[in-house]
Image (tube, coloured by chain):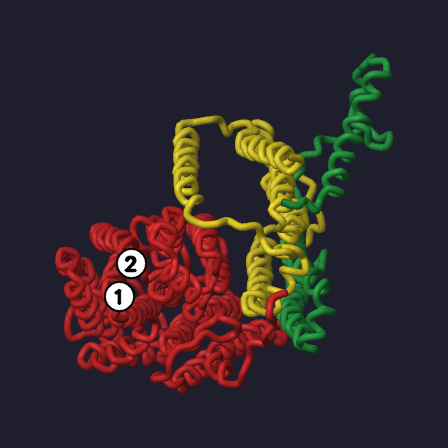
Amino acid sequence: MHFDYLSVLVLVALGIGNVLFMVALPKLLRPSKPNPQKLVAYECGENPVGTSWIQYNARFFSVALVFVVFDVEIVFMFPWAVVFKSLYKTQGCVPFWEMFTFVLVLLVGLAYLWAQGLLEWVKSVRKA
Amino acid sequence: MLPIVLPVDTGDLTALGPLLAVLIAALGVLTVDMTFEREEARGRWSFIVGLVGAGLAAGCASLWQWEAPGRAILGGALYADAFSSFFDVLLATLLGLTLVVSWYCLDRVKVKPAEFTGLAVLSFSGMFLMVRAADMLTLFLAIELMSLPVYVLAGLSAGSKTGREAALKYFVLGSLASAILLYGMALVYGVTASLGYTDIAGYLATASRESGVENPLFLAGLALMLVGLGFKVAAAPFHMWTPDVYEGAPTPVTTLMASGVRAAAAAALLRFLAGAVLLTRGHWMMLVWALAALSMIAGNVGALAQTNVKRLLAYSGIAHAGYMLLGLFALPRGAGGFSMYVAVYALSVLGAFGALQWFDDRGRETVDIEDLAGAGKRHPWMASVMTVFLLSLAGIPPTAGFAAKWFVFAAAVQAGYVGLALLGVMTSLFGAYYYLRVVIAMWMDEPADISGADQSPTTGLVLGLLALAVLFIGCFPGWLWFLADLASSKLV
Amino acid sequence: MLTAIVFYILATLCVVTAVLTVTLANPVTCALSLIACLMCLAGLFAQLSAGYVAILQVLVYAGAIMVLFLFVVMLLNLTREEADEGTFGTARALTSLVCVAFLLDLYVFVDAAVGTRDFTEALEGFGSLAGVGEALFSRYLVPFEVISLLLTAAVVGVVAITRRQLSVSKASEPLKVAR
């Protein structure tokens, strides 16, 4: 069996190794004298207010959901772009129209989203 | 490199007509929903586009040459055959009726008409795909396309706690069922190395017994797929979600779930069992036997104690899934009884839910048997219509339900499953009790103290015609049986 | 040899992080260990010469879907106490038991079936980007186009659900900072 992703593996190993190294080295070198002032979370010099556990607005979630939808679209365009040249030789413009239909249907979805006001941040609900 | 053949010719396009009509209608409804400024105009026009789509689909489907041999089109992803056309006509009818009977009810359950129509037509486009899916990948995507809008629809009723619970329950369990189905498909693919039904059947025919029909991995995959599809047709023991979801969802959505979704799921089940894995029927018929027996018992027993009509019809639906499955024992000769039963059940249950919506009081859904008390005195015409649908569900002659039951029981007896057929007859006699309870409440009890709302005459007329059709099929079942049998015989 | 070593490392990590995902108390750490699990899974896919699926796993699952998970965690905004409540009760023990039984069952089935078919190595280019592209635009054209409809249905669903939710909560507030 062949293994094509050795470079990726090396990259991952380097990434993990790098982080471990950067954390471990200062631990060995630095003196450790904690006091309450030092242990406060660093927020660019300001004193932190409250915790980081706050409730997000539901609007972030709808945007994230839509992001996933179009992320999946990109995932399907990727292989299309890779094979388009070879497909063009055998089938002409047909693969283009195949992708065109795909994107067109999704464009209807995007237009719907827009028309219903989900892309407007402040006045987010279309007046019924 | 794979051989690339462009899989389109004009003959295929006529076969795809109904599917394309509904797909374009779905996109059209979305376009309408963003074009018009006023809410009423959006609702009305999306309704019209949906109806036109349904009409075109029914028209295209009936143009199909029913005698023509079936074939796989578009690179083997879809079938063009009489079976798809039979279900195309059925689904187009169901789509049109669902839109019409729900129209005046949407306001009461606080669902936006344009949103309902858009999601319903999208869901139906999934169903049209499902009945002609010729490989497991298309089947899975079609199931998801059908289910996703229904998950959303189930929770659309604004501010209703039971509605939200129903939506969540349906979504979580539905996703689990999809995952199980997908797992089963993966195992089947792993063994047969093909996704297409014809290829799977071909592999089973050529492979040795140990690597084919007796292969434990293959059988495990098949069992998992049956679990997933059993969930969609709500056969026991995968039925637990049904009563809660049917009760919690707004009645228009319940109408869609009980008729369209289950008809499409049943058709897909039959196509898969007959088209792909017919050779292993010795194995899966045992499972189907268990599913059918359990469904008939669980559904009828569960329905006895219900006072809520939606829950009652949910349990009766489980029982009907059991009767439906009896029709599968006619394989490999073609399961015409199964297809006919699906059609008759879908029409009757749609009528029953439609009539229930018609009885809605102003601003409130009619759900309890008590709410229907005395309906015969206040609205004799609509009460008679509801009675016809309930009698059809109970399987009492001269309604369509009786004829359909006759054919599935005959199929089971001919295949040698006399015990199961007897169980079916006994449970349906037993089941007649709870349908009659509703009928008696409508005709014998004193009117409940609710003001009559201004009901729509159009909906009443459509439901009346549907009731006449149910009676007509009951008196002359021959033609429907002929079509269903012709359609199903092309599968094998 | 290297393949086997990498496989066992990835598989072990995958199982460990999967178990951590369901047992850790803090939902955010659960989500993070799920990311780790998905990454290991992507590695396993890559080893099975399913390069496209591996990329997809990282891009869509570890990337986009996880964002959704974290948003849900933030949206629900459990307090520490509520988050810690999920302890290992009878129901969970039973569920785990069923899962383990299912796993053993599967092992038996796979074990019995492996000998019955020649599992040959995949063809050259199978599962690669180009291979998937070729299949997607010839044999699997219909499923491909159905996906676009499915995504559109998802968009419509998002609109329907969030519009209702937004009209229930106060829509005019641009950002709500609780507590």
Name the kind of residue labelled 2 in the image: Arg
Q: Chain of mark 2?
A: B
Marks 1/2: CA distance? 8 Å
Please indicate whether residue B319 sits to the left or right of residue C57 in the image: left
Residue at left 33%, top 51%? B214
How many discs mark residues in the rendered view? Answer: 2
In the image, residue B353 above or below residue B155: below
Residue B402 appears at what percent x and percent y? Answer: 18, 70
Choose between B20 and C109: the one closer to the eye: C109
Residue that label 1 marks: B331
Q: What shade does chain B have?
A: red
Q: Check the picture and name the quadrant holding the N terminus of chain B.
A: bottom right
Which chain, by letter, is yellow? C
Tag 1 near tag 2, CB within 8 Å: yes
> Of the residues under marks 1 and 2, which one precedes in the sequence?
2
Residue B91 makes an appearance in the image:
yes
> Residue B34, located in which quarter of the rendered image?
bottom right
Q: Check the picture and name the quadrant holding the C terminus of chain B.
A: bottom left
Residue A62 appears at what percent x and percent y? Answer: 63, 54
Which chain, by letter, is green? A
Say which element carries label 1: loop
Q: Residues within 10 Å of mark 1 (few under 14, many from 20)?
A: many
Please indicate whether residue B457 sits to the left or right of residue C92 in the image: left
Residue B281: mark in rendering? 2
Residue B145 appears at what percent x and percent y? Answer: 50, 63
